[in-house]
Image: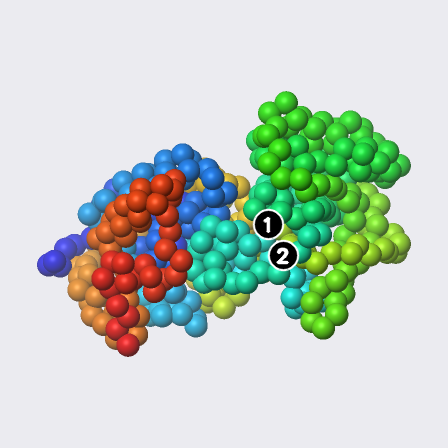
Amino acid sequence: MSEQSAYFVAVIGAGPAGLFGARELASQGARVALFNRDIKPGGLAEYGIYPDKHIMKEGLRKQFRAALDNPNIDYYGNVVIGEQGDLSLGDLRALGFQAILVAAGAQGTKWLGLPGENLEGVYHAKEIVYGYNKLPPYNQKNFRIGKRCVVVGAGNVMVDIARYLLQNRKADEVIAVVRRGPGEVNFTKEEMKHIIANLDMPAFDAEMARVPPALQAIDQDPELGRHKILDALPKADPKTAEGRFRFEFLASPVQMLGENGSLTKLEIEDNILTLKDGEVKARGTGNKRTLDVETVIFAIGDKVDDAFGLPVASNEFVKSTTPRFPVEGISYESSIDGVFVGGWSRQASEGLVGYARKDGINASKAVWQYLQTLQPINVNPEALAAKFKNFDKAVITKNDIKKLETIEAAEAQKRGLEEFKFASNEEMLQAIGVTETA
């Protein structure tokens, strides 16, 4: 392809924020190089949505295919951007990119720094979700899932993991440890309906009888929380597993205890509730107790990658507090000129696919405003292709993705499955006839 005069932009991450941000810039006439850590595009829309939501996922994939069909977008999968990656932000600058939009999600892992986090049987939600959604290499990890499990958290991810533990791993008991009260749970009834049939009602009633004093201290009606949870009952899925699900409200994990390197107990501390600036906060009472469990999974949100190459504060990349190009009053500018952030790279663990899409588009609008202060340049994608020849790995293109999708669809049909995914990057590469270069 010959050189063309255009704005030259790198978009990092091919989840909803990156894909729709890239589409927006490409539709304005910018030449966009879309870099993705994974072989397949989609990000959490591909690897974070519960496996049986086939219609939703296929609808999103159609939108992603349409975005990638824009001739102004070049896709480079299986390429890690970061200080320890295949290319750094400095490398991208040296390759002539005039602006960089970081939409790589929150690739770091958020831990609480508690004793025992390294025990076998203690995991972050991200590992489990990526595992059951068949993202290499997480899908090849041997997780120690026992009969008694705890999921720390009170959002949709907690519900998804509890569902997986009950229905797929046949756990006898799954306990949601929630640091605040039932009124602060933030899962939707659309998600809760999948496990509400497994709710241990006597245990739930006992919890609802235990927590009122803490709720009354902040003038909160206990019925608020009861409705948030039980409103899922009318739409409850049929019960397909016998394990029981229950809540431990007003409790925070303190430490994990184990024997011979494997988890055996979770110590929790009882909390009271306080109101600060209108926000409900949990505060420890000093009263501690233990739960006999074999698995603890933290569903407490994510953080950005500290080693990516951008300054980090409070689990997020630092944003300019005086943005030159705000969109809807929001700063999408990092602390480095010409580098922008969108989606979960701007605000970790905030919102679902629709939010990421809107945020990626708005971030691209900020990028476009910035580009208007520059002159278009002669873009030569061949220079980038030449750089890839020095890699010791395969770089995946749009044509490779189309080929892989066709092969996996045929394999799913042959096996009578709703969908089929190859188990490893090596199998994907082999299927499409691409080999690592080293």
Q: Which residue is mark 1?
A: 169
| Numbered marks: total | 2
Q: Position of residue 245 (x, y in %)?
A: 70, 41
Q: Please name the residue shown 46% across and 67% down the image.
A: 309
Quarter of the image with the C terminus is: bottom left
Which element is circle 2 on? loop
Q: Please name the residue shown 24% across and 64% down the image.
A: 434
* Amino acid type at image mark 2: Ile
| Residues tagged 1 and 2 counted as in contact (Cβ below 8 A) | yes
* Amino acid type at image mark 1: Arg
Tell me, yes or no, if residue 336 can be seen here: yes
Q: Please name the residue shown 81% across and 34% down the image.
A: 202
- In the image, is residue 309 above or below residue 71? below
Q: Earlier in the sequence, mark 1 or mark 2?
A: 2
Q: Position of residue 295 (x, y in %)?
A: 67, 57
Disc ID at residue 36: none
Relative to residue 22, is residue 268 drawn left or right?
right
Furthest residue to the left?
Answer: 2
- In the image, is residue 106 above or below residue 410? below
Which element is circle 1 on? loop
Q: Which residue is mark 2?
A: 145
Tell me, yes or no, if residue 345 can be seen here: no
Q: Position of residue 164 (x, y in %)?
A: 58, 46
Q: Position of residue 351 (x, y in %)?
A: 53, 41
Relative to residue 51, is residue 11 drawn left or right?
left
